[in-house]
Image: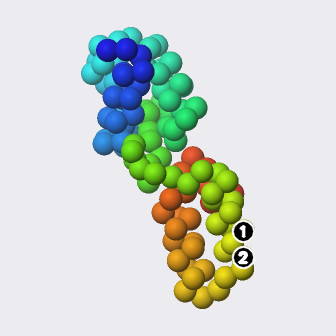
Amino acid sequence: MTANERRLAILESLCNSRQDTIDNLAFAFKVSRRTIRYDIETLSLDYPISTVQGNGGGVYVSDGFYIGRKYLKPSQKDLLERLSKTIKGKDLELMQDILKSFSNPKNKIGGQ
């Protein structure tokens, strides 16, 4: 298994379980803890993955993120946010629902 294949498998595993520990991932993928830390560091550059140290800590994927799901590009999100300022009522509610459903959890809506 190459490093990229392993990272994709780690991402898929995290999307299924939502969280895991460095030790469990190292055991599952038969690599060192340091390799898993490096993989997580690399994945976190492109995906909403975070780590928490200490008791109860581990590796987490953000709520709402699933691999293979389509997300808005920043320019698409910006356009929809600008357009939402020109509409009202049910259309505005629909636009807000689209933004909520397809915005990347790593790039929160409206700075929230």
Residue at 60% across, 80% down: 92
- Reading the image, the residue beneath label 1 is 82
Q: Residue 34 at x, y = what percent?
A: 46, 13
Q: Residue 103 at x, y = what percent?
A: 55, 57
Rendered-image quadrant of the C terminus: bottom right
Q: Count the numbered circles shown.
A: 2
Q: CA distance from mark 2 to mark 1?
A: 6 Å
Residue 9 in view (yes/no)? yes
- Colour pattern of the rendering: rainbow
105 to the left or right of 28? right
Front position in the image: 80 or 43: 80
Amino acid type, label 2:
Lys
Rendered-image quadrant of the N terminus: top left
Front position in the image: 85 or 28: 85
Amino acid type, label 1:
Arg
Residue at 72% across, 76% down: 85
Few, some or many residues within 10 Å of mark 1 (<14, 14–19, 20+): few
Give the vertical position of 40 relative to 99 (above or below): above
- Assign a secondary structure to mark 2: loop
Q: Residue 79 at x, y = what percent?
A: 68, 63
The numbered disc on residue 21 is none
Front position in the image: 55 or 58: 58
- Reading the image, the residue beneath label 2 is 85
Residue 21 in view (yes/no)? no
Residue at 41% across, 16% down: 3
Few, some or many residues within 10 Å of mark 2 (<14, 14–19, 20+): few
Q: Are marks 2 and 1 in contact (CB under 8 Å)?
A: yes
Q: Residue 27 at x, y = what percent?
A: 29, 18
List the single residue furthest toward the bottom: 89
- Assign a secondary structure to mark 1: helix
79 to the left or right of 9? right
27 to the left or right of 38? left
